[in-house]
Image (tube, rainbow, N blue to C red):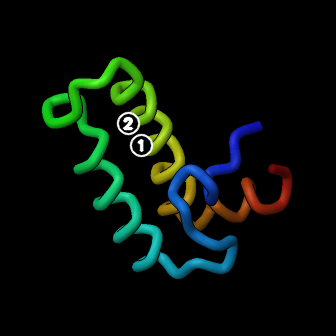
């Protein structure tokens, strides 16, 4: 199971604003149009997946409960 908090580099008790800031920073850094390294696209997908779960209060609650 992926640790979405680790992917975004935020603590488990991070606020929605902290999660959003971390996502924006990492998305800019690893966006395939900006970062041409071979693993950038895969990392970008992980970042998007983590943000999709942690930015949605219901999905985050389920993730926190069941991993």
Report the front residue among 38 and 32: 38
- Which-is-in-front pick, marks 2 and 1? 2
Give how far across and how far down residue 65 sits, in percent: 83, 60
Report the front residue among 52 and 45: 45
Q: Is residue 15 above or below residue 52?
A: below
Give how far across and how far down residue 45 sits, in percent: 42, 32
* Measured Cα–Cα span from mark 2 to mark 1: 6 Å
Which quarter shows the N terminus?
top right
Quadrant position of residue 24 = bottom left
Contact flag, marks 2 and 1 (Cβ < 8 Å): yes
State the residue at coordinates (46%, 69%).
Answer: 19
How many marks do you count on the picture? 2
Number of other residues with Cα within 10 Å of mark 2, as a class: few under 14, some 14 to 19, many 20 or more: many
Number of other residues with Cα within 10 Å of mark 1, as a class: few under 14, some 14 to 19, many 20 or more: some
Which of the numbered marks, if any, corresponds to residue 37?
Answer: none
Which residue is denoted by mark 1 in the rendering?
48
Report the front residue among 14 and 53: 14
State the residue at coordinates (69%, 71%).
Answer: 12
Q: Is residue 24 above or below residue 34?
A: below
Question: Most extreme residue toward the top, as rendered?
Answer: 38
Question: Most extreme residue toward the right, as rendered?
Answer: 66
In screen coordinates, is 66 left or right of 3?
right
Give how far across and how far down residue 55 sits, in percent: 48, 62
Which residue is denoted by mark 2 in the rendering?
44
State the residue at coordinates (56%, 50%).
Answer: 7
Question: Most extreme residue toward the left, as rendered?
Answer: 33
**Residue 59 showing in the rendered view:** no
Asked which secondary structure carries label 2, the reply is helix
Q: Is residue 14 above or below residue 60?
A: below
State the residue at coordinates (64%, 61%).
Answer: 60
């Amino acid at each position: 199971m992926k640790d979405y908090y680790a992917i975004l580099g935020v603590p488990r008790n991070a606020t929605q604003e902290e999660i959003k800031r971390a996502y924006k920073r990492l998305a800019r850094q690893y966006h395939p149009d900006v970062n041409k390294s071979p693993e950038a696209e895969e990392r970008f997908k992980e970042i998007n997946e983590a943000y999709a779960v942690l930015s949605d209060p219901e999905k985050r609650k389920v993730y926190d409960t069941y991993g």
